[in-house]
Each structure stands twice: as C-alpha cells, then as structure tokens.
Amino acid sequence: MRILQEFVVARSPDVVWQFFQDVPSVAQCLPGAELTGQTEDGGYEGTLSSKLGPMTATFEGKMTVMTDEASRSATIEGKGVDKRGGSRGQVKVEYSVQSDDAGSKVSVDANIQLSGPAAQFGRTGLINEMSRRLIVDFVSCLEAKLEAGTQEEAEAIRASEVKGVSLLFASLWAWFKSLFAKRDE
C-alpha cells in the first residue's frame, strides 16, 4: 500500500531539516511510536502501536535512516513484528524538505506492506484517511517542539495518544464524505 502526503511547516527548510535529523524528537511526535534503543550500525529499535477499531497491533522492530543533506531528503526503512497478534510489517519512507511560500513543504512517500490480521486494514481507503489525521497530529507536535523556549520544554512535548475507535469513526466519516463528493463532481 502506498501513502503519499504533503504538509507545510511555518519554518525555514534548514530548521525543519535539522529537526528531522533528531530521530528521538521525531519519534516523540509520531503517535504510538517509541524508540527503545540504537543499534551498533546506527539504526534504531523501537515499537509502533496502532489501534484499529477493536484491534491493537504493537510492532517491535528496527529501522535505518539514510539522509542526503544536499537535497534535504532521506529514506527510512523499517520492519517489525506484532508478536501478540501475528502481524508483520515493512515500510520504506522517502521524504524531502523543500522551500515553500509559507515556510517548508515536506513530501512523504511511504510504501507499507502488512501481513497477518493487520493486513485487512490495508485493503480499504481508511488507511489513507487515518494517515492524513495522524499527519495533522505529527505537524502540531513538530511545530510545538520548534516553538518551545527551552530544550526541556521541547523534550516534554509529545504526540497525543491515538484513540483507535474515535480515529476509526472519524476516518470512516471522512472517507464516506469523500466518496459522495466524488459523485457530485
């Protein structure tokens, strides 16, 4: 499943790019993500929990980040296993930070592969809608961290907890509305 997203941050590309180089701070802004360690080769270990209706998947895994400073772009590759639910996931995310009239435009191209029970949610348009909602939370956290007066204040700012059922219903509603909007065009 492929997810394409873009968002704008009201800061210069240099500031936003530097923020993305601080992987622990970025993880704090990802709802459900927690870094648990760093590997000898410079990668990261962690968990990613997601509540999808009645199902909760907690993927434990590893990721690597390869950056290109000159183009302000990076590739993140990760894989994980939900030991309790039996699902597996792999992700490859490419992102770039570009100049925009309002500050910086961040483009994200994610290719996600799920197997096991979690894969049933990859067959609908709901994942795209849910990712849009999670991006809004991520950007809000990122901007709050950048506005913090001190390092301690920035460290205390974290993404809000994802409420699976409410996120699912809000996403379903937005998805249904988009279906009817397409019919009216």
Image (cartoon, grey):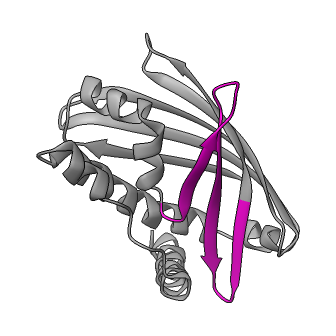
Left or right of 126, for residue 160: left
Left or right of 160, for residue 94: right
Residue at image coords 46%, 63%: 134
* Main secondary structure of the magenta stretch: strand
45 or 54: nearer the viewer: 45
**Magenta span has 55?**
yes
Position of the C terminus, as image quadrant, is bottom left
Q: Quadrant of residue 66?
A: top right
> Height in image: 67 above or below 45?
above
Residue at image coords 42%, 20%: 72
Left or right of 86, for residue 34: left
The magenta region covers 31-59
Left or right of 110, for residue 99: left
Task: Count the marks.
Answer: 0
What is the x, y in percent for residue 163? Answer: 49, 82
What is the x, y in percent for residue 154? Answer: 25, 50
9 or 145: nearer the viewer: 145
> Height in image: 36 above or below 177?
above
What is the x, y in percent for residue 102? Answer: 18, 38
Residue furthest to the left:
149
Residue at image coords 16%, 49%: 148
Residue at image coords 41%, 34%: 20
What is the x, y in percent for residue 61? Answer: 74, 50
